[in-house]
Image (spheres, rainbow, N blue to C red):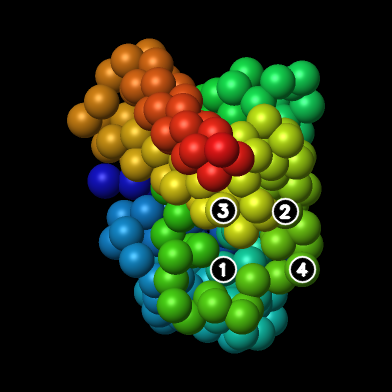
Amino acid sequence: MVTARRPRRGQRLPPLARRELLLDVAAALVLEQGVLPIGVEELAQAGKVSKGLVYRYFPEAHDLYNALLERSLDQVAEALDAAGDRPDLATAAGDVAEAYYRHVARTGPLIQIILRDRFMVGHVSPRAAAIRARVARRLARKARDALGLDLRETLACLSIGMTMPEECGRLAFQGELDLERGALLCRELVLGVLDVAGRRGLEARR
């Protein structure tokens, strides 16, 4: 069961600290149930606040989920940016996959749950989308040059490849996969996808 630090009833916190605490509680609830949505009343009770206070910080449901998404992406963005700057495709893709895998293994598949929920289609914040796109563009340029695929095929290849760290990370987070074995498996699977894509690109050029 996922837990988050929760305040004592009546404990007074500065607004930013209260918001962060509500995000901690919301993240724990999302990971515990594995899907969206979470109820405002449930969040208020778990966070020991009124429903009105929840609405004050997060007027709409997607405001809450975007806040969770942006915070989680911020936590891993620096590692993903550094990995995406590696000079060759295999190293960059492998390092990005491992960085993302370790984040999911440590904090849970929160990004995956939010982005795959149908409610969030068209509601992902520009800031969250920009963080994702920044890393994707770097890998896409390397992949397009190295694999000889068109942009659509390149993006499809990257999309398939990034499911590997999500799933391996989820298993490690749940204790069903050893952390280091999962990191190796994740890298091998991503490189396997690139190998298949490279052969496809080679055949297309003949």
Which mark identifies residue 65? 1
Looking at the image, which residue is at 55% across and 24% down?
94
Q: Residue 140 at x, y = what percent?
A: 69, 44
Q: Which residue is mark 4?
A: 126
Marks 3/1: CA distance?
30 Å
Marks 4/3: CA distance?
24 Å
Q: Which residue is mark 3?
A: 153
Q: Secondary structure at mark 2?
A: helix
Above or below for 180 versus 6 = above
Q: Earlier in the sequence, mark 4 or mark 3?
A: 4
Query: In the image, is 89 to the left or to the right of 126?
Result: left
Q: Earlier in the sequence, mark 3 or mark 1?
A: 1
Q: Amino acid at mark 1?
A: Tyr
- Residue extending furthest front? 206
Q: Quadrant of residue 29?
A: bottom left
Q: Earlier in the sequence, mark 2 or mark 4?
A: 4
Marks 2/3: CA distance?
16 Å
Q: Amino acid at mark 3?
A: Glu
Q: Secondary structure at mark 3?
A: helix
Q: Are marks 4 and 3 in contact (CB under 8 Å)?
A: no
Residue density around tag 1, few if under 14, some if 14–19, many if 20 or more, within 10 Å: many
Q: Which residue is mark 2?
A: 133
Q: Earlier in the sequence, mark 2 or mark 3?
A: 2
Choose between 148 and 119: the one closer to the eye: 148
Looking at the image, which residue is at 32% across and 15% down?
181
- Residue extending furthest left? 176
Marks 4/1: CA distance?
13 Å
Residue density around tag 3, few if under 14, some if 14–19, many if 20 or more, within 10 Å: some
Q: Amino acid at mark 4?
A: Pro
